[in-house]
Image: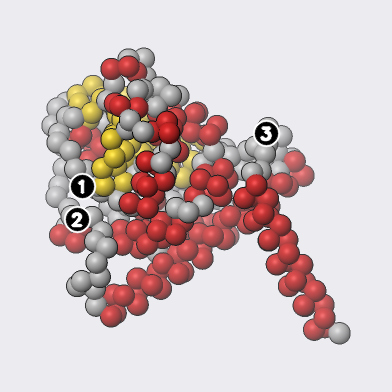
Amino acid sequence: MRLMQHKREAYWFYRYLSVFYDKLVNPLFWTARMREKSLDIGYWDEGADLTVIDVGSGTGFTTEGIVSRVPAKNVTCVDQSPHQMGHAQAKSVLQECTFKLGDAENIPFGDDTFDRYVSAGSIEYWPDPQRGLNEAYRVIKPGGWALMIGPLEPVNPISKFAANTWMLFPPEEDYFKYMETAGFDRIDYTYVAPHWQANERYGIAIIGRKPLPGKSPNHYEAVAEEQQLVAVSNDGVTLGRGVMLAGRVLLGSTAGFIFIPMALLASITAPLRGIDAEPEPLNKEQKVALVAVGVIAAVLIVNRLTKRR
């Protein structure tokens, strides 16, 4: 299991990442264009009457796309991070949404409750992705649709190593296996990618229909340690587990943050690499981060040249 593919580690990772998630992470890796292309394969014709659950809703970036299709009062946001959720609750367009702390593998709602299920950029942290898709099946009504959006395993060896060290980046075939095993039919999909990414198969949006009421035909109960939300208290955490937790969060965060300067450089060099997609302008925070990367690189180069003398 990867460094961040644990609920407690992910909880603390997002405790700090939530501060700049919408400023640095989403504009690079999960853009508005990607969000709209992904949501477009959903079935929103009866939008005014649809009830939607957004699982792993985080700071509400994907939810903002959902409420442009469905009334906010019909949307329920579920996330295990109160820190991420706090940022979503502060957004004016999401004021009428319902927010519930909860776990993607143990969704706190009954069977056959919602018309649509959406989850974007959450599967990476799930210890048991198959159970997460089983839960998606369980909570939507018969004839309802579940839309799963997530990253694909990178092709570049360096990116692949960093990704697989950090969290779960499933191969494309695994997404189809998760959906089919959960019981979904009429499966459809599209690929999504930021403008700086040459590989079209950077991410996938995959959707399936629930044919029958009730639980997934593959339903099974979670193991004991994965049944509850992460507790803020450290009661019951041994010294060894605490050290492992700190180590995983530190190493996982380092592996994750490596992607930010890599993506910033890829963004500004995209035309030089023959990528002619329309660029998305850098925001203020991205420009500051890019300058910081440049300064650090310059300092390291000067230091290296000075030592050679």
Within 10 Å of the Cα at label 2, are there few (<14), some (14-19), or many (20+) other Cα atoms?
A: some
Residue visible at 73% across and 61% down? 294
Q: How far apart are marks 2 and 3 (CA)?
A: 43 Å
The disc, 3 or 1, on the residue closer to the chain's N-terminal end is 1
Q: How far apart are marks 1 and 2 (CA)?
A: 8 Å
Residue visible at 41% across and 73% down? 247
Q: The residue under label 1 is which amino acid type?
A: Asn
Residue visible at 80% across and 74% down? 302
Does 300 appear above or below 11? Answer: below
The disc, 2 or 3, on the residue closer to the chain's N-terminal end is 2
Residue 106: numbered disc: 1
Location of residue 161 in the rendering, given as x and y in whole percent from the top left corner = 51, 61
What residue would you read off at disc 2?
A: 228
Q: Which of 250 and 175 is in front in this view?
A: 250
Within 10 Å of the Cα at label 3, are there few (<14), some (14-19), or many (20+) other Cα atoms?
A: few
Q: How far apart are marks 3 and 1 (CA)?
A: 40 Å
Q: Nearer the viewer, residue 279 or 20?
A: 20
Q: The residue under label 3 is which amino acid type?
A: Ala
What residue would you read off at disc 3?
A: 277
Whether residue 175 is visible: no
